[in-house]
Amino acid sequence: MKILIVDSSAWIPDRIAGLLAETLENKSIYKAFSLQEARTLFHQVKPTVVILDKNLPDNGSLTLLKEIKSGGKNTTVIVLSFRISVNAEQQCKLAGADYFLDKYTDFEELPDIIRHAGSRMSA
């Protein structure tokens, strides 16, 4: 399974990658720190799952989310945010997000969600 982590922070992708390395087997993890880098990696590796920071600069998260869902409809997109609001969640879900999680409280749910996404793809 290929997993793309997109976050402008330097430490969040490493933390997520560490968690996934400990809990998931047979995965390849890719990291992007900008919208352009994420676009390039998405088209190169065609990931099964994208973990996307809601707060990329210049509203890049919604732009990327829409691009992923228009070109890779089978890709599961998990949006992570520090600032949870009903409006932000609705906005992401309307753009195609499969999951919307709080970086503080829902972080540990990632491995189970990704396992589920992987089993859906192999079914």
Image: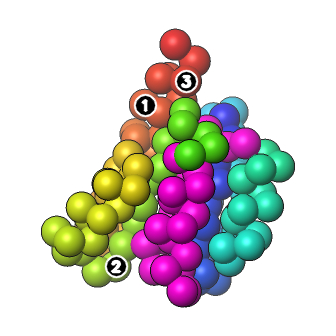
What residue would you read off at disc 3? 121
What residue would you read off at disc 2? 82
Q: Residue at x 66, y 73 (%)?
A: 35
Looking at marks 3 and 2 on the same chain, the residue that comes earlier in the sequence is marked by 2
> Mark 1 near mark 2, Cβ–Cβ under 8 Å?
no
Mark 2: which amino acid?
Answer: Phe
Q: Which residue reaches farthest right?
A: 44
Q: Which residues are magenta?
A: 46-69
* 26, 86: nearer the viewer: 86
Q: Please state if 79 lies on the left or on the right of 71 as rendered.
A: left
Mark 3: which amino acid?
Answer: Met
Q: Please state if 118 lies on the left or on the right of 26 as rendered.
A: left
- In the displayed structure, would residue 38 be above or below residue 44? below
Q: Residue at x 54, y 86 (%)?
A: 58
Q: Name the quarter where the N terminus is drawn.
A: top right
Q: Secondary structure at mark 2?
A: loop
